[in-house]
Image: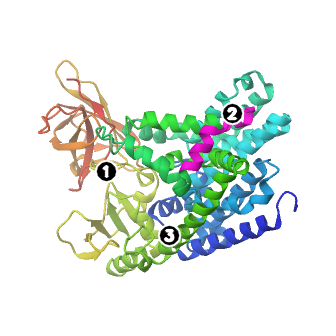
C-alpha cells in the first residue's frame, strides 16, 4: 500500500476530500446543479439535456445527506477516485518523490478543481475518462476478456455521463486501429452497447428529443472571431490556469514511445482540433473541452518528472495557484471576500422572499429551467417552467411538472412585466421579478405541431397531436408563427389563422390528432429563414409546440 500510495499521498488526498466536503456543505448550489437535482427527483434512463449519470450520483448523495451535501457528496468521492486512478496510471519510478507536485498540478487545473465538489455531468465524465485510460493501459500491457468487460462497462458509464464522451472513445480507437481486428475489443463494444441499451430505448421512446435539440433546435449566432475562435483559445488557456504553458509544452514535447502515450496525445489533440473546427460554427463552452484535463495531466506530470526546470516552475506557480484557488473557493461560500457575485450567492434570500410572498402556492416561472429548480430545492414548494417562443425546451417540457400545477392557483413569475401582485429582487440586486396570481391555471405546452409542406394552393398542412388524457377545446387556443433567422434566433411573431379540415370539430380529442390548413403570414422581419408554429392558451404567450421549419425562398 505504501509503495503504491506514499503516506504523503494519502495525507494530501484525505485533506482534499475533507476540503471538498466542507466546501460542498457551505456553498449554495449553482443553477445547473439545482436543475440536475430536479432530474434526480424523478429518476429515468434519460433526460432532456443529458444522459442520467449526474442524476444518479445526486440520488445516491441524497440517500446519505440532506441539503447541498446531499447533491455533492458523490462528486467528492469521484474526485478522490480520479486522483487515485491518475496516480495508478502514471508508472514513472520517480513519482513517489514528487507527490506534492502531482497534487499542485491537479489542484491548479481549474475545472478539475471545481468538479471536485460541484455536481455536473462533467464530474463523472472526468472520473470515467481517467478510469477508461487506466484500464486501456492495462489492456495494452496484458489484454484479456476480463479487462475488455471492464472497459465495456466504463465506456457505457462514460456515455451515461455526457454525449461528448464519444470523443474519448473515438480518438483512443483512432490511435490504435489494430483494435478493429481484436475480438476482445469488439467484446468490449458489445458490452458497452448492452449496458447503454436502456438509454437508447429512452431516446427512441422520446423521439430522440435530446439529440434533436443539441444538433438541430439549439439557437446559434453569427460567427464572431473574438467570441467564437479567440474565446475558444482563451478557454484552452483557462482550463490549466497558471500552468497552461507547461501543460501544452508537455503535450508538444512528449515523444510517442508506446501506444498508451499515443492514445493520450490523440485524445488531447483530437478534442482540441475537433472543437477548434467547431468554433467556426458556434461558441464552444469551456466545459466541452474539460476532458483533455485527464490525458494532459498524465503527460504533464510525466514530463516534469524528467525535466527539473519545468518541475521548479510547477512547484512555484502551483503554490500560487493553490492560494488563488483556495481564496476563490472561500469566496464561493462567502461573497464579502470579493466584490463580484456568483451563482452561489444569495439564492436562499430571493427564494425565501418569494416563498413568503407567494403564500405557498406553486410558482410558474416564465422562460427559465434554472430558477424553478433552485426555488424548489430551497423552498420545498412545487414550481414549473412555462417556456414560450423566445426561449428553449427543457426537462420541464417533457416531464409531469405541468400536470402538477394544472387547475391550481399559482403565481406566474416573469422579469419582463412592469407590474404584478408581488415583486422581489433577484440575487444580482438589479433585476426585479414580478408575480401575478392566476386562479385555475391551465396550459397545454405538450401539444405537438407537425407542419407539412405547402400544397399547390400555398397552404400548409398542420397536424396537432394531443398527448393529454383529456380533450382540448379549440376555443382556448390561438396559433402563431415565430420567424427566425438562419441561426434560429426568433425575430418576429405573427398571429396565424388556421382552419380545421373537419370544420365541425371543436376539440382536439385525447391522444389523437386534428388536422388544419393555414397560410403562412407575412413576417415583418426581412427574409426569415425558419418559422415555428406555437400555440397560445388562455392568453399566454405561444409555446414551442413545433420544430423550426425552413422557409422555401
491 within the magenta span: no
Whether residue 193 is visible here, answered yes or no, is: no
Tell me the mark number nearer the camera, choosing from 1 and 2.
2
Question: In the rendered structure, which disc, 1 or 2, sits on the residue that comes first in sequence?
Answer: 2
Above or below, comparing residue 362 to residue 78 in the picture:
below
Q: Which residue lies under the disc numbered 2?
A: 262
Q: Quadrant of residue 375?
A: bottom left
Helix, strand or loop under label 3 = helix
Residue at left offset 69%, top offset 48%: 307
Pointer 3 residue = 328
- Rendered location of residue 330, percent (x, y): 52, 75
- Tell me: 300 left or right of 46: right
Q: Main secondary structure of the magenta part?
A: helix
Stretch in magenta: 245-264
Query: CB atoms at circles 2 and 3 under 8 Å apart?
Result: no
Eyeballing the image, is 369 above or below 170?
below
Q: How many marks?
A: 3
The CA span between labels 1 and 2 is 43 Å
Q: Are marks 1 and 2 in contact (CB under 8 Å)?
A: no
CA distance separating discs 2 and 3: 36 Å
Amino acid at each position: 500500500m505504501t509503495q503504491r500510495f506514499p503516506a504523503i499521498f494519502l495525507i494530501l488526498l484525505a485533506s482534499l476530500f475533507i476540503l471538498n466536503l466542507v466546501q460542498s456543505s457551505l456553498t449554495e448550489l449553482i443553477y445547473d446543479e439545482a436543475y440536475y437535482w430536479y432530474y434526480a427527483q424523478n429518476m429515468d434512463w434519460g433526460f432532456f439535456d443529458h444522459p442520467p449519470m449526474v442524476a444518479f450520483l445526486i440520488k445516491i448523495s441524497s440517500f446519505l445527506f440532506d441539503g447541498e451535501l446531499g447533491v455533492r457528496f458523490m462528486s467528492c468521492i469521484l474526485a478522490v477516485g480520479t486522483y487515485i486512478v491518475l496516480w495508478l496510471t502514471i508508472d514513472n519510478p520517480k513519482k513517489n518523490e514528487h507527490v506534492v507536485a502531482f497534487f499542485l498540478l491537479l489542484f491548479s487545473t481549474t475545472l478539475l478543481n471545481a468538479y471536485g465538489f460541484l455536481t455536473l455531468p462533467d464530474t463523472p465524465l472526468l472520473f470515467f475518462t481517467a478510469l477508461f485510460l487506466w484500464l486501456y493501459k492495462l489492456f495494452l500491457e496484458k489484454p484479456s476478456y476480463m479487462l475488455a468487460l471492464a472497459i465495456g462497462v466504463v465506456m457505457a458509464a462514460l456515455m451515461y455521463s455526457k454525449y461528448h464522451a464519444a470523443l474519448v472513445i473515438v480518438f483512443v480507437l483512432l490511435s490504435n486501429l489494430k483494435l478493429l481486428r481484436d475480438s476482445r475489443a469488439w467484446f468490449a463494444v458489445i458490452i458497452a452497447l448492452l449496458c447503454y441499451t436502456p438509454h437508447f430505448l429512452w431516446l427512441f421512446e422520446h423521439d430522440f428529443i435530446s439529440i434533436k435539440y443539441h444538433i438541430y433546435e439549439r439557437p446559434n449566432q453569427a460567427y464572431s472571431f473574438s467570441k467564437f475562435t479567440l474565446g475558444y483559445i482563451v478557454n484552452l488557456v483557462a482550463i490549466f490556469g497558471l500552468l497552461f504553458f507547461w501543460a501544452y509544452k508537455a503535450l508538444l514535447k512528449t515523444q510517442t514511445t508506446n501506444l498508451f502515450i499515443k492514445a493520450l496525445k490523440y485524445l488531447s489533440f483530437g478534442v482540441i482540433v475537433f472543437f477548434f473546427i467547431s468554433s467556426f460554427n458556434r461558441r464552444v463552452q469551456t466545459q466541452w473541452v474539460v476532458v483533455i484535463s485527464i490525458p494532459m495531466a498524465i503527460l504533464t506530470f510525466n514530463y516534469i518528472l524528467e525535466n527539473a526546470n519545468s518541475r521548479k516552475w510547477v512547484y512555484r506557480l502551483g503554490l500560487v495557484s493553490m492560494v488563488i484557488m483556495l481564496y476563490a473557493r472561500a469566496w464561493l461560500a462567502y461573497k464579502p471576500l470579493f466584490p463580484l457575485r456568483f451563482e452561489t450567492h444569495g439564492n436562499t434570500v430571493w427564494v425565501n422572499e418569494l416563498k413568503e410572498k407567494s403564500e405557498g402556492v406553486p410558482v410558474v416561472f416564465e422562460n427559465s429551467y434554472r430558477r424553478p429548480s433552485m426555488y424548489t430545492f430551497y423552498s420545498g414548494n412545487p414550481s414549473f417552467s412555462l417556456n414560450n417562443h423566445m426561449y428553449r425546451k427543457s426537462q420541464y417540457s417533457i416531464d409531469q411538472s405541468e400536470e402538477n400545477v394544472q387547475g391550481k392557483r399559482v403565481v406566474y413569475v416573469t422579469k419582463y412585466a412592469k407590474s404584478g401582485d408581488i415583486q422581489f429582487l433577484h440575487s444580482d440586486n438589479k433585476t426585479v421579478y414580478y408575480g401575478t396570481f392566476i386562479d385555475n391555471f391551465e396550459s397545454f405546452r405538450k401539444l405537438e405541431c407537425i407542419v407539412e409542406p405547402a400544397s399547390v394552393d400555398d397552404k400548409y398542412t398542420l397536424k396537432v397531436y394531443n398527448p393529454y388524457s383529456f380533450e382540448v377545446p379549440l376555443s382556448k387556443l390561438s396559433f402563431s408563427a415565430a420567424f427566425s433567422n438562419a441561426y434560429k434566433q426568433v425575430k418576429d411573431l405573427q398571429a396565424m389563422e388556421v382552419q380545421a379540415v373537419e370544420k365541425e370539430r371543436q376539440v382536439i380529442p385525447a391522444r389523437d390528432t386534428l388536422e388544419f390548413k393555414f397560410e403562412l403570414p407575412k413576417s415583418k422581419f426581412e427574409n426569415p429563414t425558419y418559422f415555428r408554429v406555437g400555440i397560445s392558451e388562455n392568453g399566454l404567450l405561444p409555446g414551442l409546440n413545433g420544430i423550426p421549419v425552413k422557409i422555401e425562398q
